[in-house]
Amino acid sequence: MDGAGLRPERVDDDDLVPFARAVNRHFYDSEADDDVLPWVESLSTGSRAWWTRVDGRVAGNLGVIETTVSLPGGGDVPLAAVTAVGVAQTMRRRGVMAGLMAACLEEAVARGEPLAGLFASEAAIYGRFGFGVAAPHVGYRVDRSRVRFPEPVDVHLVEESTPEQAPASWPELHDRVRSERPASVAKHPGQWLLGITRDPPGWRGGASARRLVEIPGRGYASYRVKEHFDGLLPAGSVRLLELVATDPEAEAALWQHVLDLDLTTTVEVSYRPVDDALPHLVADRHALRVTESSPLYLRILDVPRILASRTYRGRGTAVLEVMDPAGYAQGRWRLEVEEAGASCIPTDAPATVGLPAQSLPGIVFGGIRATSLAAARRLEERRSGAAAELDHLMAVDRAPWTTMEF
């Protein structure tokens, strides 16, 4: 069968269990009830899903979490957070995913969601749908034997927490940190459910149940420990899932707690901001093996709304010509930033820069410089110096950061 006969359908609530099983099957994960039903519970509110079926079998699937994302300078806008994207191996290259993505983006526009976002298992796929990196992230693999904190930290600030206690205070702490970071995605209630109170053994990869710790009112961390011995010597590893703090002392204390766990030799973490404090907290930053972690990709669907809604440190004007084959961001847009605020309207004026839709999110959210894109030929200067001017206009105080994958 070719792609002409494949039509995406909305998934009814009664079909969420077979939908979830299809998602896990396409990601080579367990389809057992214990591994599927908690995720189904998280999808039951504030989300939507599509699938394409052929002869009763699921050929492809895609879900959306209805949430918000922070703009530079503060404030949130709605976000269609795309997740659970998969295509059966026997149905690849037949337009299944293209159909699902078109349905997803069309509905986002109809609902007034100016952005879609995702984390990509195979990043090369999504550029053609207009998604581009908005928030680069880093990860660390830390050799505990080489870690020393030159400044004293009061580790007694850190207390154990429980799945019953954490939901009362952690969401508010997460929102406080989000307010200071652009491109930070709010956690849907179902994500808090999956991240705190649901922890099936099949999700642990052979490691412990989640350990939850907090500094009340100031920060929290969650992690797993995987036991291992090298002969008679302990050589366990820590997988840090999330660490959030609202002040420097709390951040240092939480890091020291995680980096000083008994019976372990390494700590691994992903999804950290590129301006993270950790390299400056330790005496020897070479103890941190830094790697690139999965970035947040965004797709701008409403250019005037996004450019006019964020705040700017400077003042100025730019005319951006955006090339978007899907049409959502297509056009020439005049951005005017004045003391009273920003405006963005269509214009016939000559463009100062031209760029494809997938290059726009990194510039708008401050994660990628326009001058870097120009050097990579992913942005064209139509006037000499225009890329540097755009960098100055779009500069942010803190690097964009989303604390978790969705």
Image: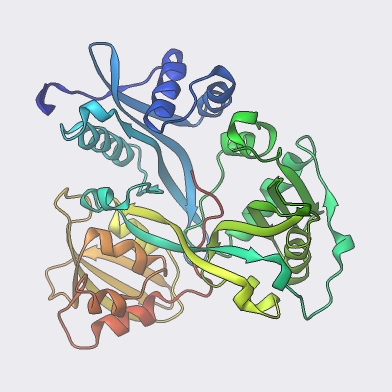
Residue at the image point whose x is 57% and y is 38% from the top? 191
Q: Where, by quadrant of the figure, is residue 258 drawn?
A: bottom right
- Against 54, residue 181 (above or below) is below
Residue 106 versus residue 51 in the image, above or below? below
Q: Which residue sits furthest front?
A: 231
Q: Nearer the viewer, residue 78 or 190?
A: 190
Q: Position of residue 315 (x, y in %)?
A: 38, 81
Residue 263 in the image: x percent, y percent?
A: 78, 53
How was this image coloured?
rainbow
Q: Residue 64: x percent and y percent?
A: 41, 36
Q: How many marks?
A: 0
Please state which of residues 349 and 205 is positioned toward the viewer in this rendering: 205
Residue 247 visible? The answer is no
Residue 358 in the image, given as x and y percentages of width and height: 26, 59
In the picture, measured across the screen, residue 48 lies left or right of residue 193, that is left
Q: Does residue 365 appear anywhere in the picture?
A: yes
Left or right, 240 with respect to 333, comes to: right
